[in-house]
Amino acid sequence: MKKRWMAAIMAAMMACSACSGGSSGGGSTAAPQPEAKTEAKDTAAAETEAPAQAAEGSDLLVSVWAGPHADLQKTVISEGYTTNPVTVDDVDYGNLKQKQLTSFQAASGSGNYDVVWVNSQWMKEYVDNGYIIPMDEFIQEAGIDMSIYSKGLLDGCTFDGKVYGFPTFAQTLILAYDSEAFEQEGLQAPTNVEELIEVAAYFKAKGSGIAVPAKQGNASTTLFSQLLFSDGGDYVTADGKLDLTSDAAVYAADVYDRLVQNSVDGCLAWHHDEVAEAVRMKEAPIGIMMSGLANQNADPEKSLIVDTVKYAPLAGKSGNAAASNTFWVWAVAKNATDPKAAFDFCSWMASYDTEKKQTLADQQISAIDTLATDPEVLAATPYLPVVMEELSNGKMDPVTTSWGTVKEAMMVSLSEIASTDADPRAVMETLQEQLKDVDLSK
């Protein structure tokens, strides 16, 4: 539980009136008080501290996705955030959204979250239901320049002209290749998808090929989305209707088919992890890799291409490279006890210095464009300029509930394209007919 709840109990016992509300749910992990430069402590330890020792200002209860990134977040907060006491409740992904939804229904000060770390795919639902608040007035008062954030990501936080959060922790598919293998064959890095297929075919003829995440699942649909977006396509028409038979959609399906045909043997069982391993262990001279795994290429205990790996955008036939944007957002809950304090925390977590510290620590991708030109950051994440190019041009998959139905059906269709000799156009036409009654507005 948070200190303001403990303060209320102590105040009642001592018949005094000074306290501030809020408590955390079971299983949360409390970040150490800002003035204590120590490792993150658990909630029980935090509760033993006297409220008088806390920094002035409202206690904040912060909801994040559990994992190594959450551990880093807690450390960064404990070492640098001095404005308010913060308790971090890190929850496994499978339960995170439901716990946030439950918190939004709680009375302010009764254990509800003040700050939520939101998957970008949940943003529209949260905004439509009034679960999170717009930040524009706070942004203006603080004089924050929002143009520092990648436009493609900031767009995913903006609804009806209002900004509902700070984007962060982004990922996208990029090309990673062994420059030594390319030099030996006299090849150049591909600058568009047709050149990529030519390179893949060349290496396939020599016994390897390209590493592609072609296992039925999210990886295949992410790749399809990126191919679609990079050629200016979209899943919906101007009037919001699903369109899987547009020229761009059919072309993306055809490219997907040709990439798989020229892939390393076994890629039909590969997700992102297997692709990354194949590239760094020289099983494939080039691969379509999730950026969040690229840091392993520089690890001599995991990689044979530490000194030879290079990166390039996954570009469409025109040379444009657009990500299928997936990222996280720092947002303020509608029932935050102190919305201004919650906003201040969000803006601090998404600030240049804080994002840089996290990027240097674990190579996570910030939404701040200029970090891609910071010499210290570039030394740690040489693939960052490629990532930021794609994110800035990127789009998001539809964010309505019905998109799940489309995505599940697409996984099956892409698997059919990859594993059979079915014509990609015919598969997409069948898929369009199958999904013709899906209302993507809901």
Image: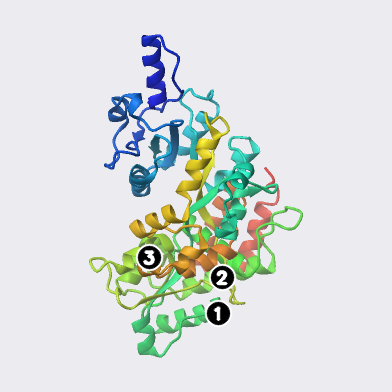
| C-alpha distance separating marks 3 and 1 | 24 Å
Q: Secondary structure at mark 2?
A: loop
Residue where numbered disc 3 is placed: 294
Q: Nearer the viewer, mark 3 or mark 1?
A: 3
Q: Secondary structure at mark 1?
A: helix
The residue type indicated by label 1 comes to: Glu
Residue 11 horizontal side relative to residue 224, left or right: left
Q: Residue at x 49, y 34 (%)?
A: 114
Residue where numbered disc 2 is placed: 321
* Placement of 290 over or under 39, stated as above or below: below
| C-alpha distance separating marks 2 and 3 | 18 Å
The residue type indicated by label 2 comes to: Ala
- In the image, 4 versus 422, the foreground residue is 4
- In the image, 5 versus 65, the foreground residue is 5
Residue 47 horizontal side relative to residue 116, left or right: left
Q: Quadrant of the N terminus?
A: top left
Mark found first going from the N terminus, 3 or 1 = 1
- Can residue 23 be seen in the rendering of this structure? yes
Residue 336 horizontal side relative to residue 244, left or right: left
- In the image, 8 versus 266, the foreground residue is 8
Locate residue 338, reporting x and y percent: 53, 31
Q: Residue at x 63, y 49 (%)?
A: 158
Residue where numbered disc 1 is placed: 194
